[in-house]
Structure formats: structure tokens, C-alpha cells
């Protein structure tokens, strides 16, 4: 009875709010999200040494923690190609305003990444009133789970995929007569795109949850295409890693595990959806 009354109150409140009221509410959610990004971007801008020397440029150094661990693993498994040492990657700036613009760009990216959980919270706060009681109950942890998966993706990419990518692309040569001198903008673009894209890829279970919820995909569809996904992930791993099986598997396993987790999520959502449709 209380659930019926709550639904009636929610519907009456939605009727009271006009299109412009919803638009105004959305505007304030966007404003607060942008404000959080700007504040964190300013903080990142003022901490240039930490952001660039200790974070952005660190993976190109052979003393970076991942590079040292890979060398230890390479020595143990007798896989010298896995070891990242003596990486003489020279980064240059070729534009007058290049370093300043990169500084601004990276500060904004850091602001977005750090503020991501809050942005998800604002999005959730906007759509939450339109959900049913059961939907609110089952998706109440969406903000926490989304934030956790995104952070895991960022860390996985930064500590594993980024060093392997830099080592492969930064040392690849078509000829001994051609030396690699990488522009700052190219280096930054590679690091940011790889890190941010993998962070979004780790949101796959969340996307699968909502796509299954509305009936766009099913767990059977994902199971049938499992082998194709495995080929895609192995191909992607082969592109960004040294030419040995171990490093390819090292990158591929977590990504494929994420796909398997998405199948389990889809299965649970699909079962609940079938039950709801039959009742």
C-alpha cells in the first residue's frame, strides 16, 4: 500500500514539473559537475610537478615501478623482450605555446578523471526521481560501482597498458637511420587516450546492465559472440605489447574477465526482466 502511495506521489510530482522545470534542474546538475571539474583542474594546474614529473612522464622511465617489475618477471621467465630498460625516449616541444596548452589540457583531463565519481552522482541524482521504487532499490549502488570500475580501468591502463604501449611505440623503428624524437603533444595524446579509453571500457558491465534492462542485448547474444570478443582482445593486446605471448595474455586476461563479468550481469538482469514480464 505504501509503495502505491509513493508511486502516486512520484507521478503527481512529475506532473507538476514542466519541461522547463526539468531543463532547469538538468542545468544545475551540469553546472555543479562543471564546477567540480574546474576546481579540480585548477588544483592540478597548480601542482604541475606532481602531475607531469611523477605521473604523466613517469611510465617512460625505466625506473617506473611497472617497468622494474616486468624486468624481474622477464628474468624469471627468460623473456627478455618483456623487460623495459634503457628506454631512451626523447620528448620535445615544437610549438611556442605547446607546453602551456598541454599544461591546460592535462589539468582539465585530471579534473574530469578525479571528478568522475561526482559527475556520475549528479547524473544519478537527475534520473533517480523518474525511477520506480524497485528500480531505485536495485540500482542504488550504481554510482559506487561505476566509480570503482572506472578507477580500476584507469589504474590498470596506467600501470600496465601505458608502459607497454610507450615501450613498443617509442622504440619501434622502420630503420636504424630513423631516430625517435616524440613530440610532447603526441606523447600526451597517447597516454591520455589509452588511459581514458580503458577506463571507459571498464564500464562495460554498467552499459551491459542498462542495455539488457531495456532488451537491446541478451546473455545468449554475448555468449554466442564470446569467441569473436576473444579474438578482438587478443588482437588489441598483440598491437600494444611486445611480441611475446606472455605480455599479450597479461593484458588480455583482465579485459576478457570483464567481458565474462558482463555476461553474468546480463544473465541476472535478463532473468529479472523475464519474471517481471510474466507477472
Image (cartoon, grey):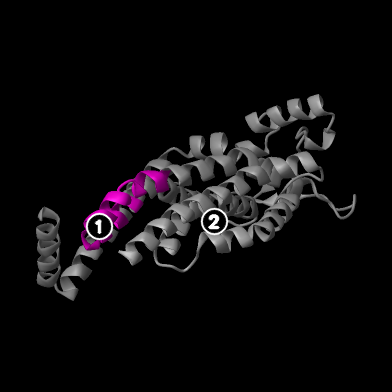
Q: Residues within 10 Å of mark 2 (few under 14, many from 20)?
A: few
Which region of the structure is painted magenta? 120-147
Query: As drawn, is 112 to the left or to the right of 32?
Result: right
Query: As drawn, is 272 to the left or to the right of 232?
Result: left
Q: Position of residue 42 (x, y in %)?
A: 37, 46
Vertical relation: 84 (above or below) 106: above
Comparing 271 with 161, the one in front is: 271
How many angstroms separate mark 1 from mark 2 (CA)? 44 Å
Answer yes or no: is residue 58 visible: yes
* Disc 2 element: loop
Q: Position of residue 118 (x, y in %)?
A: 33, 48
Query: As drawn, is 64 to the left or to the right of 205?
Result: right
Comparing 270 with 53, the one in front is: 270
Q: Of all residues shown, which one is farthest toward the right?
A: 176
Residue 200 is inside the magenta segment: no
* Disc 1 element: helix
Instruction: Name the residue at 50% across, 65% down.
Output: 217
Q: Position of residue 193 (x, y in %)?
A: 57, 54
The disc label shown at residue 97, or none: 2
| Tag 1 and tag 2, C-beta contact below 8 Å | no
Q: Circle 1 sits on which residue?
A: 128
Instruction: Name the residue at 72% across, 57% down.
Output: 231
Answer yes or no: is residue 104 visible: no
Comparing 16 with 266, the one in front is: 266
Comparing 54 with 234, the one in front is: 234
Q: For residue 161, which quarter of the picture?
A: top right
Classified by dominant secondary structure, the portion drawn in magenta counts as helix
Q: Quadrant of the N terminus?
A: bottom left
Q: For residue 17, which quarter of the picture?
A: bottom left
Q: Quadrant of the C terminus?
A: bottom left
Residue 139 is inside the magenta segment: yes
Amino acid at each position: 500500500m505504501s509503495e502505491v502511495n509513493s508511486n502516486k506521489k512520484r507521478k503527481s510530482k512529475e506532473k507538476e514539473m514542466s519541461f522547463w522545470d526539468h531543463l532547469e534542474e538538468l542545468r544545475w546538475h551540469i553546472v555543479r559537475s562543471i564546477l567540480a571539474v574546474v576546481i579540480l583542474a585548477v588544483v592540478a594546474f597548480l601542482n604541475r610537478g606532481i602531475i607531469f614529473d611523477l605521473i604523466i612522464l613517469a611510465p617512460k622511465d625505466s625506473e617506473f615501478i611497472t617497468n622494474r617489475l616486468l624486468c624481474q618477471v622477464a628474468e624469471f621467465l627468460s623473456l627478455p623482450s618483456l623487460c623495459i630498460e634503457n628506454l631512451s625516449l626523447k620528448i620535445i616541444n615544437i610549438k611556442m605555446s605547446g607546453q602551456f596548452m598541454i599544461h591546460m589540457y592535462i589539468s582539465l583531463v585530471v579534473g574530469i578523471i578525479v571528478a568522475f565519481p561526482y559527475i556520475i552522482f549528479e547524473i544519478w541524482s537527475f534520473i533517480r526521481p523518474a525511477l520506480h521504487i524497485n528500480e531505485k532499490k536495485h540500482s542504488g549502488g550504481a554510482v559506487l560501482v561505476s566509480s570503482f570500475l572506472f578507477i580500476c580501468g584507469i589504474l590498470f591502463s596506467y600501470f600496465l597498458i601505458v608502459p607497454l604501449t610507450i615501450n613498443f611505440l617509442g622504440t619501434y623503428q622502420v630503420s636504424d637511420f630513423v631516430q625517435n624524437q616524440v613530440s610532447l603533444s603526441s606523447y600526451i595524446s597517447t597516454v591520455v587516450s589509452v588511459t581514458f579509453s580503458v577506463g571507459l571500457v571498464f564500464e562495460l558491465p554498467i552499459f551491459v546492465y542498462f542495455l539488457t534492462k531495456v532488451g537491446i542485448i541478451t546473455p545468449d547474444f554475448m555468449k554466442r559472440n564470446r569467441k569473436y570478443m576473444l579474438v578482438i582482445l587478443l588482437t588489441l593486446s598483440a598491437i600494444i605489447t611486445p611480441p611475446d605471448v606472455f605480455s599479450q595474455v597479461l593484458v588480455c586476461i583482465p579485459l576478457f574477465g570483464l567481458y565474462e563479468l558482463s555476461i553474468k550481469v546480463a544473465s541476472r538482469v535478463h532473468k529479472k526482466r523475464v519474471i517481471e514480464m510474466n507477472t
